[in-house]
Amino acid sequence: MNIISINPATNSIIGETNISSPEDIHQKVGEAHSVQESWASLGVKGRKNVLMDVLRLFKEHLEEIGVLSTQSMGMPSSLRNNLDLDAGIEYFEWHLENALESLKPEISFEDSTSLNTVFYEPTGVAAVISPWNFPFCTFVWQVIPNLVAGNTVVFKHAQECVLVGKLIESVFSSSKIPQGVFSEIYGGGEVGDILIHEDIDLISFTGSTTVGKHIASVGAEKLIKVLLELGGSGPGIVFEDADMDKVAEAVFFNRYANSGQICDGLKRLIVHKNIAEKVEQTLVKMLQSKKVGDPQDISIDIGPLSSIKQTDALKEQVDDAISKGAQILIGGKKPAGLSEAFFEPTLLSNVTTDMKVWQEEVFGPVLPMVTFESEEEAINLANDTVYGLGGYLFTEDKEKAEVVASKLKTGMISVNGTLYLHPSSPFGGYKKSGLGREHGKNGFHELCQLKVVATEK
């Protein structure tokens, strides 16, 4: 059987790929085990030297990856360099440049006669499963730190961007990396499930909370480490003193960029009642200025969702809100003249907490808005979710921002649109948004076994 790749903007076939068989998967896991010790024995410096060659090759193929990404999942060409390609290279380079410092042994205890040293050793064979929303960057986030840390990787990309996965595999095949250190399998959830039941030592998964729960149960049964970056329903609190220019810019980037398909995006807007009308007018005007259409057109701001299935799920959430009294301020439907995978950028008011757009993760260009009167009410609304990935605050009062940030149950918080996405900063969430952290020194350590060696002085 094959995976058929569909361009969501045109609903046309762009390619197909064979689905990996259980035998293929078993063989690749076996090869990963057979070379893991020799890969680890190269040390951080040796692995870095090999991966520098891989990095060079990815830079040469970056534009090709970008075009395939746009065709596969609809990211506008005007955004893909900043959001996916350049970001992926930045993270790749950071992990190579900072591996020695992050993974060096650390003294945990010392007295006049003895010394305790903590060593960060590879965990073994990692099963890595990535999503489709940032095809290059999420691959880098999950795969490269594993390889730098000394793990070997069997990788499965999302079936929506399987052609990007094939190109990634081709780059590795033409590099100096030993066979078996990185390999790739292809398919949907069934293939991923076969992989995580193989003889592996670590699972790194980015995707839905539902699948993440299943993976966690498999990891618990096997007693192996599981790293999960799952769903989000990031609150954005707009206080009365907020700067409207900062609000508009940050809301578009964190809610509507990539057609709203961002795990840690701003997905629930919580606005002080005294400025609600002003915020509505500002955002409606901003959205009216944005262009929806063919993502290969450099002038387009918002492309399609990754699939018609994704759009249908979004429409169901919006229809539920409307049936319960929500008001559409702009958008609210599939635009005429475009494929069924498109959905207009939408802002909803008169939202109540019993609506699906509030209770569920909304993975598309739809933003529900509610109002508050007191700081306590805003915090309670922000925390009224099973998720806890991203969070956003808008206020010119630094003390208030600090206090409110301390009370939000999220892994990351942006104040006035300031970016928290940096290779050196841990990325991950509270509650049902996942387990563990990616990036930075913390992320490296998640991929390692920690060993304490006590020696005499």
Image (tube, rainbow, N blue to C red):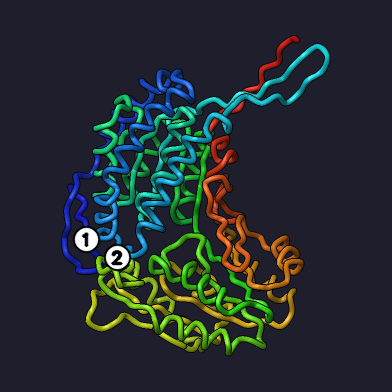
Question: Which type of secondary structure does the marked residue at label 1 adopt?
Answer: strand
Q: Earlier in the sequence, mark 1 or mark 2?
A: 1
Q: Amino acid at mark 2?
A: Ser
Residue occupying image coordinates x 45% and y 22%: 40
- Given contact means CB atoms under 8 Å apart, are the residues at marks 1 and 2 in contact? yes
Name the residue that disc number 2 marks: 307
Residue at position x 61%, y 27% from top?
450
- Location of the C terminus by quadrant is top right
Q: Which mark is residue 6?
A: 1
Q: Where does residue 191 sit, x and y in percent of width and height?
A: 31, 44
Task: Tell me the residue at 71%/12% (across/down).
Answer: 455
Pointer 2: residues within 10 angstroms few (<14), some, or many (20+)?
many
- Is residue 231 placed above or below 18 in the rendered structure? below
Residue 23 in view in this figure? no
State the image coordinates of residue 14 (x, y, percent, origin top left): 17, 57
Identify which residue, 354 or 374, lies in the foreground. Answer: 374
Residue 358 in picture, x, y percent from top left: 54, 74
State whether residue 103 is above or below residue 17.
above
- Left or right of 441, for residue 374: right
Which residue extends farthest right? 112
Count of all numbered marks drawn on residues in the image: 2
Look at label 1 and name its amino acid.
Ile
Q: Which mark is residue 69?
A: none
Above/below status of 302 relative to 39: below
**Residue occupying the point 35% across, 28% down:** 181
Nearest the eye: 399 or 111: 399
Give x and y (percent) for residue 382: 64, 70
Gap in Å between the C-alphas at discs 1 and 2?
8 Å
